[in-house]
Amino acid sequence: MRPENDSMPIRVILVEDDVAFQQALQHTFATAPDMLLVAVLSTRAQGLKILDDAPVDVLLVDLGLPDGSGIDVIRAAHAKWPDCNIMVSTAFGDEMHVMQSLEAGAAGYLLKDSSTSSIASEIRSLHQGGSPISPLIARQILMRFRQQDASQPLVPTSPNATRARLSTREQQVLEYITKGFNSDEIAGLMGVSRHTVLTFVRRIYKKLEVSSKAEAIYEARSQGLLGA
């Protein structure tokens, strides 16, 4: 992992076959001094091959690639580049694609109805520890969790139940995340650096065995780590 340095641009790789969308994003990145578009790829094969190179900060992946699914790229990137933040940008908004992407390792999911400038802002949020998700997708995830709760009601956590062991600071970060604060805001509230907050976030995700903010909040509630 490269040293934390806010003056260094966010390095991004785009895996996207829509030429018009490629060009629009390239123009947006060209006017964003805090971002560097390292490569633009258009196939699943190219996305998998570039994983043999040095990792970047953010991988932006479409799901409907001409030679296969972008989910294969997400899964491989999550394994080979564990510190890389992966975000989906796609026209597919159905539950199957959403859940498969999140389970494969995506930390964000945006529909292509988002503007390219909005996507750039969400990349910044992702890089800072957030999990940007289009409102429609977030609603689907919440509905899925509610359906699970209805079919399998949560049992109150007992002293002997398995639950993640979070440190006091990790618990504090988790509670701030639940309240909607981003990494910079949490850093200010706790009097630490953003890098320290991101380290806490990674530890929380690892202990809860999740890969996104939405999953972390749900799993923490399931384990009784948060109030109702």
Image (spheres, rainbow, N blue to C red):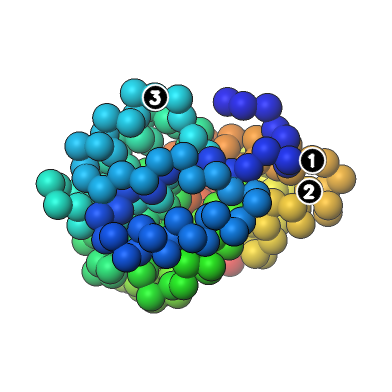
Q: Which mark is residue 193?
A: 1
Report, in whole angstroms, how far the alpha carbon at label 2 lies from the one at label 3.
Answer: 32 Å
Answer yes or no: do the residues labelled 2 and 3 have beta carbons within 8 Å? no
Provide the residue designation for mark 2: 187
Q: Residue at x 73, y 40 (%)?
A: 7
- Of the numbered discs 2 and 3, the one sitting upstream in the chain is 3
Q: Mark 2: which amino acid?
A: Ala
Q: Is residue 140 visible?
A: yes
Percent position (x, y) of residue 112? 36, 69
Q: Relative to residue 185, is residue 138 drawn left or right?
A: left
Q: Badge 1: how crowded within 10 Å, few (<14), some, or many (20+)?
A: some
- Of the numbered discs 1 and 3, the one sitting upstream in the chain is 3
Q: Nearer the viewer, mark 2 or mark 3?
A: 3
Percent position (x, y) of residue 96? 22, 61
Q: Which mark is residue 53?
A: 3
Percent position (x, y) of residue 125? 60, 56
Report, in whole angstroms, how far the alpha carbon at label 1 lies from the one at label 3.
Answer: 29 Å
Answer yes or no: do the residues labelled 1 and 2 have beta carbons within 8 Å? yes
Q: Is residue 204 visible?
A: no
